[in-house]
Image: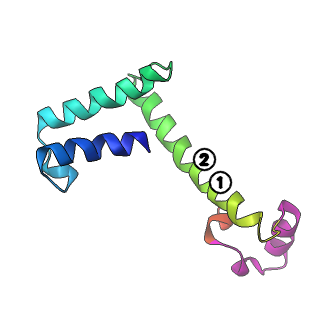
């Protein structure tokens, strides 16, 4: 969320609507803002591309799993009921995010 706000702040300051409308210097500023968020939280910004990719992939899966958990809890869907539905070919009744598990 904070990182999204950093991009929005730079776009607002520059008077543009889309990320692609930012200049190279604007994007460098966004990177510095991202790094500041990490540093402010006691973390070191990952410099290695593979580390960045791994963290990005994990963030996507964590987000999907959080969404699935938030859906399942109020609908009383448990791991057992999900597995049962998969084996009974009734998984079409479950949210699409759960089909990937």
Give whichever of 27, 58 is nearer the camera: 27
Position of the C terminus by quadrant: bottom right
> Percent position (x, y) of residue 98?
68, 65
The label shown at residue 62 is: 2
Secondary structure beneath label 2: helix
Q: Residue at x 78, y 81 (%)?
A: 90
- Up/down of 95 relative to 22, above or below: below
Give whichever of 28, 84 is nearer the camera: 28
Mark 2 Cα-neighbour bin, 10 Å: few <14, some 14–19, many ≥20: few
> Percent position (x, y) of residue 31?
28, 31
The quarter of the picture where residue 26 lies is top left
- Up/down of 45 relative to 98, above or below: above
Mark 1 Cα-neighbour bin, 10 Å: few <14, some 14–19, many ≥20: some
The quarter of the picture where residue 28 lies is top left
> Percent position (x, y) of residue 58?
56, 41
Q: Residue at x 65, y 54 (%)?
A: 65
The quarter of the picture where residue 48 lies is top left
Distance from disc 2 to disc 1, alpha carbons, whole Å, reads 5 Å
Q: Residue at x 87, y 71 (%)?
A: 84
Residue 101 visible, this orientation? no
60 lies left or right of 99: left
> Percent position (x, y) of residue 99?
67, 67
Which residue lies under the disc numbered 1?
Answer: 65
Give whichever of 30, 52 is nearer the camera: 30
Position of the N terminus by quadrant: top left
The answer to whether mark 2 and mark 1 are in CB contact below 8 A is yes
54 lies left or right of 67: left
91 lies left or right of 3: right
The coloring applied to the image is rainbow
Residue 42 on the magenta segment: no
Tell me the magenta residue range. Answer: 78-95
């Amino acid at each position: 969320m904070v990182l999204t706000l950093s991009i929005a702040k730079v776009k607002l300051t520059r008077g543009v609507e889309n990320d692609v409308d930012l200049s190279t210097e604007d994007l460098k500023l966004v990177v510095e803002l991202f790094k500041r968020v990490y540093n402010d939280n006691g973390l070191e910004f990952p410099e290695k591309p593979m580390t960045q990719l791994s963290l990005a992939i994990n963030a996507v899966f964590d987000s999907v799993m959080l969404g699935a958990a938030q859906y399942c809890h109020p609908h009383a869907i448990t791991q057992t009921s999900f597995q049962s539905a998969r084996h009974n070919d009734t998984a079409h009744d479950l949210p699409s995010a759960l089909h990937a598990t």
